[in-house]
Image (cartoon, helix red, strand yellow):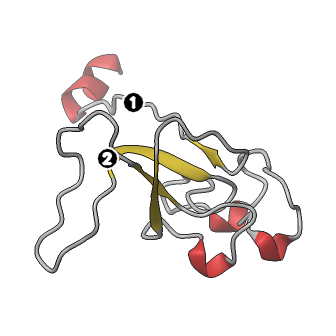
């Protein structure tokens, strides 16, 4: 993973660290840059945690995953912080995601 111990000292293209891919072949889920989330930043209490609640203007937003300047122990999706959405930095970014359609058994049979 692209964290401080890798000594790159900058961001890296997706896929440079294939050993850290998930079983679903999702690349670079930790390290490289902190990833913005839509969730408002709130401190966790002792009860059940709910992310994705309605946002309020001016709230701090969640950043997750650690970045190229962090120790490896901070590069994990459970590691989170909060910043104002207006903050810009070369250590912060976001992930594009695409939902793909997986054909059902009937659709696969029909295509054959």
The circle on residue 74 is none
The kind of secondary structure element at disc 2 is strand
The kind of secondary structure element at disc 1 is loop
Q: Nearer the viewer, residue 43 or 34?
A: 43
51 displayed left or right of 9: left
Marks 2/1: CA–CA distance: 24 Å
Residue pictured at 18% horizontal, 45% vertical: 53
99 displayed left or right of 25: left
Residue pictured at 71% horizontal, 66% vertical: 1
Residue 101 location, x and y as percent?
34, 28
Residue pictured at 33% horizontal, 33% vertical: 102
Name the residue that disc number 2 marks. Answer: 39
How packed mark 2 is, by other alpha carbons closer than 10 Å (few <14, some 14-19, many 20 or more), is: some
Residue 107 location, x and y as percent?
25, 24
Give yes or no for contact between labels 2 and 1 (Cβ–Cβ under 8 Å): no
Q: Is 84 drawn above or below residue 72 in the view shown?
A: above
Among all residues in the image, which is located at the extreme left? 47
Q: Nearer the viewer, residue 18 or 88?
A: 88
Among all residues in the image, which is located at the extreme top? 111
Name the residue that disc number 1 marks. Answer: 100
């Amino acid at each position: 993973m692209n964290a401080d111990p890798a000594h790159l000292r900058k961001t890296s293209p997706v896929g440079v660290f294939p050993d850290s891919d998930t079983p679903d072949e999702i690349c670079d889920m930790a390290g490289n840059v902190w990833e913005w989330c839509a969730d408002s930043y709130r401190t966790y209490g002792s009860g059940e945690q709910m992310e994705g609640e309605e946002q309020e203007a001016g709230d701090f937003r969640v950043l997750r995953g650690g970045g190229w300047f962090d120790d490896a122990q901070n590069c994990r999706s459970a590691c989170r912080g909060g910043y104002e959405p207006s903050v810009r930095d070369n250590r912060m970014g976001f992930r594009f995601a695409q939902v793909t359609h997986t054909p059902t058994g009937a659709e696969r049979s029909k295509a054959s």
